[in-house]
Structure formats: structure tokens, C-alpha cells
Image (tube, coloured by chain):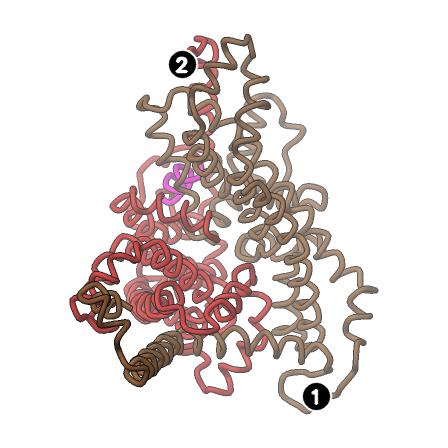
Chain colours: A brown, B red
Amino acid sequence: MMQMRTTSTTGRREDVEQSTTSLDSRRRALRARRLRRGWVALALVVPAALVYVVFVLRPLLLTFQFSFYDWNGVGPSTWVGVENYTRLFGDPEMLGSIVNALQLIVYFSFVPVLLGLLTAATIRKMATSHLAIVSRTVLFLPQVIPLVAAGIMWTWLMSSDGLVNEILRAVGLGAFTKAWLGDFDTALPAVGVIGAWVALGLCMLLLLAGMTKIDPSLYEAARIDGAGAAREFFSITLPSLRQEIGVCVTVTVIAALASFDIVYISTQGGPGNSTLVPGLEIYYLAFFSREIGQASALAVAFMVLVLAIILPIQRLSRESD
Amino acid sequence: MIVSRRETWLGRVLLLLLMLVTLVPFVTLFITALHPPGSYPSGLTLPETPHWSNFVDAFQAANMGALLWSSVLIELGVVPLALVIATLAGFSLGHLRPPGHKWIFLVFVLGLTLPFQGVIVPLYFQMRDFGLLNTRWAIILPLLGLYMPFAVMWMRAHFVNMPQELSEAARIDGAGTWQLFSRIHVPLSAPALSSLGILLFLWTWNQFLLAVVLVDDPTKRTMAGALGAFQGQWGTDIPLLCAGSLLILTPTLIVFLAFQRQFVAALMQGAVKG
């Protein structure tokens, strides 16, 4: 491309007088080079595409395939059609795991996003104070450690002799103490608290970054017009943060639906099946009950569910662009 | 900006409260780790004499040296290779744009929201057929594939944003595609590469599901996977478990505090792009 421009600037006149054959040959050479560059470019994608195809796309297709079979992982497999799916929709344990994951969205997503909005809105007003700077580092810590470690910490905190119950006893609420992760009514919310603790820092920092991009003159104008802090928040801050909120919700909802580490460590799905989530149920079905077909059917339904929830959120938050 | 005093004051209280809630679990973990092994310390009571030996015991019980080495090997297998192949693909799809580049990119993006649980069952059998179960390759190879949607998208976004004039100037000077890539684009990609590298390091270190399913031997797992096994084995000895957890999460904290600025930027960009 560049060569063409250089020749045309050196002599526009010669260009016109050039014979058609040389123009043709040059065009052909150019096309050949572009083609060669195209092959080089495609070759550069090959390594990434190879690992992606072998370790993601192929397993993905196999999950679909397995879901129509009855297989214990070693012996012969038999085609059963959609039987695994019909069983899935009639089974309280598997359906319950999906319901639990949906409930976890409240704790993993709504709580950190709302709390993050509130905190970010307050920090914005004291952006350069020492406290604000220190708190950014501190609130981010749970994002960095393994979820497994977060699970172990909180399992200990919420055990019957843990700190949570100690505090309740100290303030005279001893009647409310219980083994939070071992109680049918409180186990799922207790798992949710761990997720909220992990997600808060990320949400807050993302929303804060979004807020610093808002034009300060908007706030000045609002104050002059006599708007209070609440009015200011709902009329200026919230609408401007549409995209950041979308990101927070997407990330945390995926974390809720795909939760595995925290539940595996803190409750293993119990007591009963009160904290069973699809990720854990797939693991149990495939590697303990050896029902590969059934586990795969649940995995397919689970992935469809994730897409069905994430895609509308993405669309809503990107609409404004 | 006009801010009332009451608002500032309320903001401070809120921040302090949240910081307290964030830090208390870490502090509890630390204090509990100093109690006599096998005991059930309650709440935040300090031990009469701190049992620093718990850390040594946990280090030995968990075979921490071997665990660290295993994690390092897995990181070395995943991060540099993922960076190289994602950079090549990102350069191609973002800069050279061969015919069909939009479709290829779309296929990569498809994998972005894919939870690992969706492919873990076939992955197990695939690894068994490859004869790689219970080796570190069983974690390294799938992670490379699973990181590709994000890593390729990240690097492509970087190369798309590079000014076209830069490459044109290099082409005039007679640079071929390889020289253009190695002399111009790679040196200018250092910030994007280091952010991606930090993210991949952290995700690999904390990877749990693949480690639990594909590798039985804790000394061949990632750190998070090893911690899961440690909990299974020593779950009843609370002080020892706390000491072990602290030992395993400390490296991530050190990396975080050392590269804090890049770290936060990387994780936030990562969230936005993902």
C-alpha cells in the first residue's frame, strides 16, 4: 500500500502513461502479497485456536453428546435420548441446586453492588484523604486471596464458637447464636455473606472509577438548583454509571451461578441439600455417583441458564453506547 | 465542591466499618493460628503464649516446599505460554485482520462467559485418554485453552487501539510483518502484557476446580487446590488449619502489595473487558 503512494507522488504523469500490462502485473503482485500476509496472519492464530479448540470447544461438544447417553465412565454407554433432561426437570435435588444458585445472586451480586454504590458515593467526596486511599487497598484484599482461603476463614468465624457468635453473646443476643453454616435456614445466606465479602471491594472500586469520570460541574449545577444528596445520587450518579453497574452485575452474577470453591470448602452442599449449587452437583454426579450422562445434562442446562441471564444484562448495560 | 460536614463524617464511619469487616477475618485467622494446636480457641482471645511453631508444623504437614514448587511449575507452564500465543493471535486479529478475522474472534468471544464446570466432565475423560491425569499438564493445558477467550480479546483490544500510522511508517522503511511485530508492536505492548500476566498469575494460583478434579496428589496441584486437600486432612485442628491457610494466602498478598497499582488496574480492566 505504501509503495503505491510513494510512486504516485514521485511521478503522477508516468502513472497515466504506464502500459496496462505493468499495471496488471503490479496489481497481481500486490494481491499475491496481501494473500501471503493473510496466510501468515491466519497462521499466527493457530496456536491459540488449537488449545482453545482442544481444551474448550471439543469438551463443550462432548458435554452435549454425553448428555444424551447413560454412561458410568468406564463401561459401554447407551443412547437414552432426552431422558437425562426429563429426569433433570423432575428431580428436586438438581432443580434445587439451580434454585440455590439463583438465590445466591442476591448475596453475591445485589448486596455488593448496592453497598458498593453507597460506599463509592461517599468516598468520592473525600477522594484524596488518607482514609480513602488506605481503604482502597484494604477493601481489595479479599479479591486477591484464593476463594478457598476465604471459605476457611469464614467457616471458622461462623462456627458455633466463632467470632460471630461471640459478638452476639457479648451484646446480649446470645439467644440468636447458632452454627450458621450448619443450620438449614441460615446456611445459604451464610454462604452468601462470604461471597458478598469477596465481591464488595471489586464492585466499590469499579463504581468509584466510574464516578470519577462524571463531570463535576453536573454536581455543582445540581447543588445550585437546590438538589439534596439523595436527589443528586438518583439524578446524576446512578444514570451515569449504567455501564459500570452492568459490569459489576455481570461479574458477580457469574460468580454466584458458577460458585464452587466457597461452597465446597464451607458446607459441601449441606446441611441436606440446602446449599447445593449446580457446579457442586455436577462434580458429585460425575465423579462420585458416576452418572456421566446426567451430570452432562445438568451442565448443559446450567450453561444455558448462565447465558439466558447474562446476555440480557449485557444488552441492557451496553444499550446507551 | 460543597460537601456538608455531616456527610463527610458519615462517610468516614462507613469506610472504617467496612474496613473492619474486611480485616477481621484476616486478624482472626492470624490470632487463631497462634493458639495451641488441637485447641478450639473462642472468638478473638489472645493465646497465653503464641505458638509460632504452628507455622512450622503446618509448613511441614502440608509439605509446603513441594506445594510452592508445584505452583511455580504450573505458573511457568501457563503464564508465559498463554501470553505468547494470545499476543500472536491478538496481533493477527487486531492488526493484520486476515479474511474471516471477525468470525474467528466471535468464536473466541463465545467462551467468555463459559463457567469451567460446563466442560470439566469431558475434560476429565479427555485427560484420561491423553494419559495426563494426575500430572501438572492436566492443569496447565486446559487452563491455556480456558484463558484464551479473555487473553485473545485483551490483546486484540490492545492492538486495535495502536495507531495505524505507526505500522505504515515501519512498512515504508521496509519492515516485514515479523519485524513490524517484534521491533514495533511487542515493545509497545509491555503495559498490556504485564497486566494480563498479573491476572493470569492470580487466576492460576487460585484455581481450585481443575486441581480438585484432575489431580489427586496435592503436591502436584495449584496452591488453592492444595489448600483444599489440607483442609480435608487437618480440618479438625483449627490452629494448624489457620496457620496453613495463612501460609498459602501470603504469597498472593505479597504479590498484590508489591504490584498494587498495576494489580488493581489490571483486575478492574479485566472486569470491564470481561
Q: Are marks 2 and 1 on the same chain?
A: no
Vertical position of residue B87 compared to residue A193: above or below: below
Residue range of the region highlighted in magenta in the rendering: B25-33
Vertical position of residue A71 compared to residue B32: above or below: below
**Residue bearing the label numbered 2:** B1
Q: Which of A222/B69 is in front?
A: A222
* Residue at x 56%, y 12% (from the top left corner): A227
Residue that lies at the very extreme toward the bottom in this rendered image: A76
Q: Report which quarter residue B90 is drawn in.
A: bottom left
| Viewer can see residue A158 | no
The subunit carrying tag 1 is A
| Viewer can see residue B143 | yes
Q: Report which quarter residue B74 is drawn in.
A: bottom left
**Residue bearing the label numbered 1:** A77
Relative to B78, is A313 on the left or the right? right
The subunit carrying tag 2 is B
* Residue at x 57%, y 45% (from the top left corner): A318
Mark 2 and mark 1 residues within 8 Å of each other at the beta carbon: no
- Report helix, strand or loop for mark 1: loop
Mark 2 Cα-neighbour bin, 10 Å: few <14, some 14–19, many ≥20: few
Vertical position of residue B173 compared to residue A229: above or below: below
Image mark for residue B139:
none
Q: Which amino acid does label 1 sit on?
A: Ser
Residue A321 is situated, as x and y percent measured from the top left of the image, at: 54, 43
Residue A145 is situated, as x and y percent measured from the top left of the image, at: 40, 49
Q: Report which quarter residue A89 is drawn in.
A: bottom right
Residue A156 is situated, as x and y percent measured from the top left of the image, at: 51, 44
Q: Does the magenta stretch include residue B26?
A: yes
Q: Which amino acid does label 2 sit on?
A: Met
